[in-house]
Image (spheres, grey):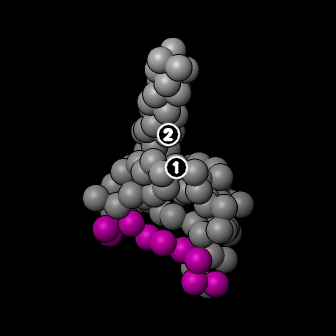
């Protein structure tokens, strides 16, 4: 299982991420408020401004102080590493 850093030493399992969103739109603001009301919000901003919203397959909403693009790059890099490992295994066998 691969993890990515979402800020301040907090990690999220790559396989569980469903979507990344910018917190500025009205629908995402409603999603954040609804998840806070339901107890599904996980705030890992450490008091800083929310810059990315991560939605997981368990319907938890993770609020991060790292830019959406940065998290997307980390997700892409973790996927690339998996592809390289799979390719090396195929070449050996």
Q: Label 1's element?
A: helix
Residue 2, x across and y down, in percent: 45, 48
| Magenta stretch prevailing secondary structure | loop
Dividing the picture into quadrants, the one containing residue 11 is: bottom left
**Res 78 → quadrant:** top left
Q: Position of residue 32 (x, y in %)?
A: 60, 69
Residue 84 shows in the view: yes
Q: Which residues are magenta?
A: 38-47
**What residue sits 59% from the left and 56% below the top?**
16
Disc 2 versus disc 1: distance between alpha carbons?
Answer: 7 Å
* Residue tagged 2: 75
Is residue 92 shown above or below 31? above
* Front-most of residues 49 and 58: 58
Q: Does 12 appear in magenta?
A: no
Residue 38: where, in percent of width, then height?
Answer: 64, 84
| Residue 85 located left or right of residue 55 | left
For mark 1, what is the residue? 14
Which residue corresponds to the image point at 49% horizontal and 33% vertical from the top-left?
82
């Amino acid at each position: 299982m691969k993890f990515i850093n979402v800020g301040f030493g907090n990690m999220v399992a790559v396989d569980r991420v469903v979507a990344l969103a910018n917190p500025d739109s009205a629908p995402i603001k409603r999603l954040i408020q609804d998840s806070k009301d339901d107890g599904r919000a996980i705030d890992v901003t450490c008091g800083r401004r929310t810059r990315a919203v991560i939605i997981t397959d368990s319907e938890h909403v993770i609020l991060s102080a790292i830019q959406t693009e940065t998290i997307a790059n980390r997700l892409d890099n973790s996927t690339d590493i998996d592809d390289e490992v799979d390719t090396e295994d195929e070449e050996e066998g």
